[in-house]
Amino acid sequence: MRPTIVVGLGGSDGWHALAWATNEAATVGGRLVLCRACRPDSALAERGVTGSIRQLEVVDPALARAVGTARARLGGDRVDLRIGPGRPGQVLVEAAADADLAVIGPPARRTSGGLGSTAHHLAARAPCPVVVARPAGSARTAPFAGHVVVGVDDSPAARSALEFAYRYANAHRRPLVAVHVTVDRREDYWFDEAMLSTHFTAEPAGLALLAVEVELWMRKYPAVPTKRALYAGRPLPGVLRAASGASLLVVGDHGYGAAVRAILGTISDGVLDRADCPVAIVHALERRGATLAEVA
């Protein structure tokens, strides 16, 4: 069965989200669902799903081009269109209920805790992993440029993120770096499993945690080049520093409610806003996305 990827269209970055999702569907042999929210009384709500591409061009030319572009790349049998009346966040969460991955562009702006952003709404509530697609950063000389970077601690959410990251790295033939950020260090450190090279002056705290968390996935995906990194400081700045120039940053979401997110924010909210690369948000014990990259 083909994995299903839902992509939200709309906003200034809708085309970049479409390109990312289309490329992912091509890589894993997936099915793509283009999702667009609209007003209940609009012509798009009335005619968009049942009409032909020519009729859709009259109602929404940009959406018609998006459908045509995706079908030209993947084939018509692998691209569907879903139009839902209502608020974009709600429409996308409903569409993601049957999906293995949801993709959306980054927020143009945010309110306190990201509660006013469609991207934040989807990342917090979707039952599958969510990728916030943006161009990879230009820091080509950064230590982990081009890598899949995944934030690691000993939580269930981080373990789900680690699983997703290894599957993605394996499907896309990318090296992976597992990053743990700790306030117990003043200097950054990393260890290259392939080259067996170390970059630290004293045995760092947190090394044992990384070794335990990564070991299972290194055995399962021996073809994925792996590095383990300890970064100094607070979690959000450390993860962002490690992900400079990355091909994808993967973090777990611990599932805090709206009230906590609004007051304190979360690491996933922070990287969604501030990372200079695509970001995947993975919830604890999330299984629907587990098969996405296994197809490749």
Image (cartoon, rainbow, N blue to C red):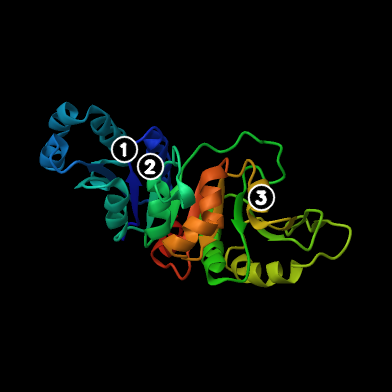
CA gap, disc 3 to disc 1? 36 Å
> Label 2: how many residues lie within 10 Å, few (<14), some (14-19) or many (20+)?
many
Q: Is residue 60 left or right of residue 20?
A: left
Callouts 2 and 1 close, C-beta under 8 Å: yes
Q: Position of residue 232 (x, y in %)?
A: 75, 56
Query: Which residue corresponds to mark 3?
Result: 237
Q: Is residue 216 left or right of residue 201?
A: left
Secondary element under disc 1, as helix, strand or loop, is helix
- Work out whether residue 171 can be spotted: no
In-front residue for pair 291/121:
121
Which residue appears at 32% of the width and 41% of the height? 74
The numbered mark, 3 or 1, whose residue comes first in the sequence reads 1
Secondary element under disc 3, as helix, strand or loop, is helix
Rendering quarter of residue 213: bottom right
Work out which quarter of the rendered image holds the C terminus and state it.
Answer: bottom left
CA gap, disc 3 to disc 2? 31 Å
Query: Which residue corresponds to mark 1?
Result: 70
Query: Which residue corresponds to mark 2?
Result: 22
The numbered mark, 3 or 2, whose residue comes first in the sequence reads 2
Q: Is residue 205 left or right of residue 121?
A: right
Q: Position of residue 34 (x, y in %)?
A: 28, 44
Which residue appears at 63% of the width and 40% of the height? 245
Q: Position of residue 272 (x, y in %)?
A: 51, 48
Which residue appears at 63% of the width and 48% of the height? 240
Position of residue 123 relative to residue 21, above or below, is: below
Kind of residue at badge 1: Ala
Q: How many marks?
A: 3
Kind of residue at badge 2: Thr
- Work out whether residue 146 can be spotted: yes
